[in-house]
Amino acid sequence: MNIKKLFPSQEEDEVIILVVREHWFFMFTRVLAWLIFVAVLFLFDKYAPQFIPRLFEMPYLNFVNLGKNIYVMFLVLGLFMLWTIYYLNVQIVTNKRIVDIWQKGIFSQRISELTLPNIEDVTSEVRGFWATVLGYGNVEIQTAGEKENFIFQSVPEPREIEKMIINQTGLYHGPRGNE
């Protein structure tokens, strides 16, 4: 499958090798936190009429319904934002460079690029019980010069990503030992 123009500065002859997003476990934990707010709405509907019956009489009932509708709109918007930011935060490895796209918010995005010749070292790290069990961790790409290091945080299979990047830089630089 050939992906065309996944990011703005992608060149015509540039081949995408890997697209990486944060491990699903972190999206799962955010959705669980979101579900707590959904539970608050259901608990309000179940227990508020028993403990605050006047709220459900006129003229207060209209305000309660308005408040619940606004709350539901924010819940839907929150879930939309969770998914959008998860989906748009991506690291891309091509045959020429590494691109880190960080979506800070709906209208805020940062794109960083690192060409393969500037890579000096690649390190993967898996820390903790859940990271070991679920197979996620960090990949740090050290660069030449004053450029900031790239860190892929909480990505699935960090050791495989590290090996793939090292192999790609080896392919880019050609065979070693003939220098």
Image (cartoon, helix red, strand yellow):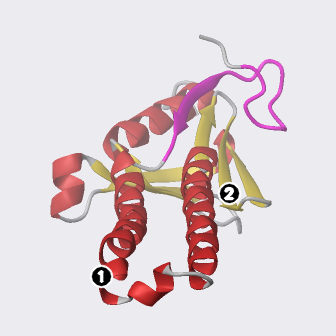
Q: What element carries label 1?
A: helix
* Quarter of the figure with residue 69: bottom right
Our reading of the magenta stretch's main secondary structure is loop
Residue marked by disc 1:
50
Q: Give the crowd class for mark 2: few <14, some 14-19, many >=20 residues within 10 Å.
A: some
Q: Which residue is drawn at 51% across and 81% down?
A: 57
Q: Does the magenta stretch include residue 132?
A: no
Q: In which quarter of the image is the N terminus?
A: top right
Residue under the point 30% across and 82% down: 50
Which residue is rendered at x = 50% and y = 44% of the image? 21
Residue furthest top as drawn: 1
Name the residue furthest front.
58
Q: Depth check: 133 or 30 in front?
A: 30
Instruction: From this view, report whether residue 47 is shown above or below residue 129.
Output: below
- Residue at 55% from the left image edge and 56% from the top image edge: 82
Give the number of the disc on residue 103.
2
